[in-house]
Image (tube, rainbow, N blue to C red):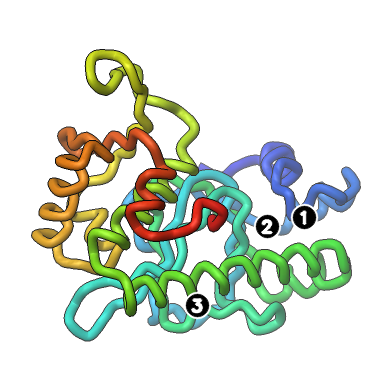
């Protein structure tokens, strides 16, 4: 079902990228930019897609990844609400043969080349924010590539769990060790975590069991309970100051 433009306008107003736009500018943008709801697990962009499109993630979480020659996946970035990404030469946005997958139910704003030229490029505030977002994602991609090259799977997994937990504010009502330490519950299966760290499922299962034995996490059916993200970062030999 199509989302009426007044509601689209309200959604756009909540995105940091457009925080300085006037009501009239938001109205024009909302009338031109369609929005699309995408169920969790949907791959909504592939290397075969040739059309230029800019995605603005309003709700949900998206994974950008590539396929490795041995069939594994290499996660390039995990994007949160407010992220801007896509294939758009005007903005230097390229997915470089990547797939985009909705990790959770997502609400996406889609913009064509003409929309970007008419509605975004004329506002230096928006262009600057897009460039800043691109810079942050480039740093994240480089870090993930270094992780795959130089870190063992347990270290990559610990860092990923710490990162996901830091982005999940809600805590589980169930406490660790008889109600002493609440944890952060992550709804990911072993197979999903294996895809995120670019490893085989069996290797990730063994690493998860090892992390549980060390008291860093607790495994549940389809979920992982993280007790202390900073301890996971220390385990992965990553400075707590890093994102």
Q: Position of residue 122 (x, y in %)?
A: 88, 70
**Disc 1 marks which residue?**
29
Q: Position of residue 108 (x, y in %)?
A: 55, 53
**Disc 2 marks which residue?**
33
Quarter-of-image position of residue 97: bottom left
Is 98 located above or below residue 24 in the figure? below
Question: Within 10 Å of the Cα at label 1, are there few (<14), some (14-19), or many (20+) other Cα atoms?
Answer: many
Q: CA distance from mark 1 to mark 2?
A: 6 Å
Q: Which residue: 40% across, 47% down?
A: 162
**Disc 3 marks which residue?**
95
Identify the element where label 1 is drawn. helix
In the shown orientation, is residue 173 left or right of residue 141? left
Q: Nearer the viewer, mark 1 or mark 3?
A: 3
Q: Is residue 206 visible?
A: yes
Q: Which residue: 55% across, 80% down?
A: 94
Quarter-of-image position of residue 17: bottom right
Of 214 and 48, the residue lying toward us: 214
Q: Position of residue 7 (x, y in %)?
A: 68, 37
């Amino acid at each position: 079902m199509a989302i009426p433009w007044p509601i689209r306008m309200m959604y756009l107003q909540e995105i940091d990228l457009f925080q300085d736009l006037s009501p009239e500018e938001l109205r024009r943008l909302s009338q031109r930019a369609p929005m699309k709801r995408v169920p969790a697990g949907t791959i909504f962009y592939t290397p075969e897609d040739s059309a230029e499109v800019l995605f603005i993630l309003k709700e949900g979480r998206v994974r950008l990844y590539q396929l490795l020659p041995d069939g594994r996946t290499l996660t390039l970035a995990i994007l949160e609400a407010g992220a801007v990404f896509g294939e758009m030469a005007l903005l230097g946005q390229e997915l470089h043969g990547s797939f985009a997958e909705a990790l959770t139910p997502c609400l996406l704003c889609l913009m064509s080349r003409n929309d970007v030229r008419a509605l975004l490029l004329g506002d230096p505030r928006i262009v600057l924010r897009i460039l800043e977002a691109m810079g942050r994602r480039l740093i994240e991609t480089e870090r993930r590539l270094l992780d795959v090259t130089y870190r063992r799977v347990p270290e990559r997994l610990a860092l990923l769990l710490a990162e996901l937990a830091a982005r999940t504010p809600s805590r589980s009502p169930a406490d660790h060790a008889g109600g002493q330490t609440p944890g952060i519950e992550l709804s990911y299966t072993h197979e999903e975590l294996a895809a995120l760290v670019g490893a085989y499922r069996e290797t990730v299962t063994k690493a998860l069991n090892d992390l549980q034995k060390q008291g860093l996490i607790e495994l549940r059916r389809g979920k992982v309970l993280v007790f202390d993200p900073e301890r996971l970062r220390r385990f992965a030999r990553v400075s707590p100051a890093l994102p």
